[in-house]
Image (tube, grey):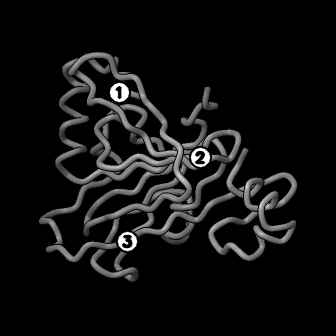
Amino acid sequence: MGRCSRARSRMGSDACRRDPDIVATRSDQTYQVSVERQKAAQAAGNYDLADLPGDLAQPAAAARVGKAPKQDKILRGGRSLTAVSRLQPGAALAVYGRPESRWAMAYWRRTGGGASMTELLSYARQLVGMTPDADLVVCLCGHAGQGPCIPLWAPRDEVSLTVQPNDLVLRFDGVVQRSL
């Protein structure tokens, strides 16, 4: 049962309208993930989607985080970081810093370009999503290259992202599977 459905059953039919994070209609449910900026020095040099391996370079939406919201650069699929960080059923948000993207690229090269999307996502600093049933989840997954990479999507009542300047926030659709 999705968060909005649980809220509706506990607090009445207008519970989702009172919760600003959940926007629900009959055909569409979304969750606005809060993005908390850490104060850190901007990393030297910029990197882009072209610096990510395989399918990581093809997100549905992406943004590079600046020191301030006005310095955010939208790379694909949205007009703001807020639009990029909006979850829909089946979607996941991944945060990659420069080190994580390098580790993912090194692993991708080691596998001869044959790394699965799950293996590449395992290198993300943070990975949160929404199941097709509209439940919020956080991914607990061992890093690829250190044994089997089996994602465990742990349910959460709410999720948020913590980012630093120059991090990439990527949204992928159809990544989160139905929970068992």
Label 1 crowding class (10 Å Cα cut-off): few <14, some 14-19, many 20+? many
Alpha carbon of mark 1 to alpha carbon of mark 2: how far?
19 Å
- The image shows residue 148 at horizontal and vertical percentages of 32, 16
* Residue displayed at 56% across by 36% down: 176
Place of residue 179 in the rendered image (x, y in percent of width and height, measured from the top left): 61, 31
**Is 105 left or right of 163, judged from the image as shown?**
left
Which residue carries the number 2 mark? 130
Residue at the location (26% across, 67% down)? 164
User: Mark 3 highlights which residue?
Assistant: 36
Q: Position of residue 109 (x, y in %)?
A: 21, 24
- Say left or right for 97 vs 138: left
Report the Cα–Cα distance between label 2 and label 3: 19 Å
| Dot 2 or dot 3, earlier in sequence | 3
Check disc 1 and give the amino acid type.
Glu
| Residue position marked by numbered label 1 in the rendering | 119
The residue tagged with tag 3: helix, strand or loop? strand
- Residue at 63% over, 46% down: 135
Cα separation, mark 3 vs mark 1, equals 26 Å
101 left or right of 176 in image: left
Kind of residue indicated by mark 3: Glu
Q: Which mark is residue 90?
A: none
- Identified by mark 2, the residue type is Met
Q: For this rendering, which residue is in front, 132 or 115?
A: 132
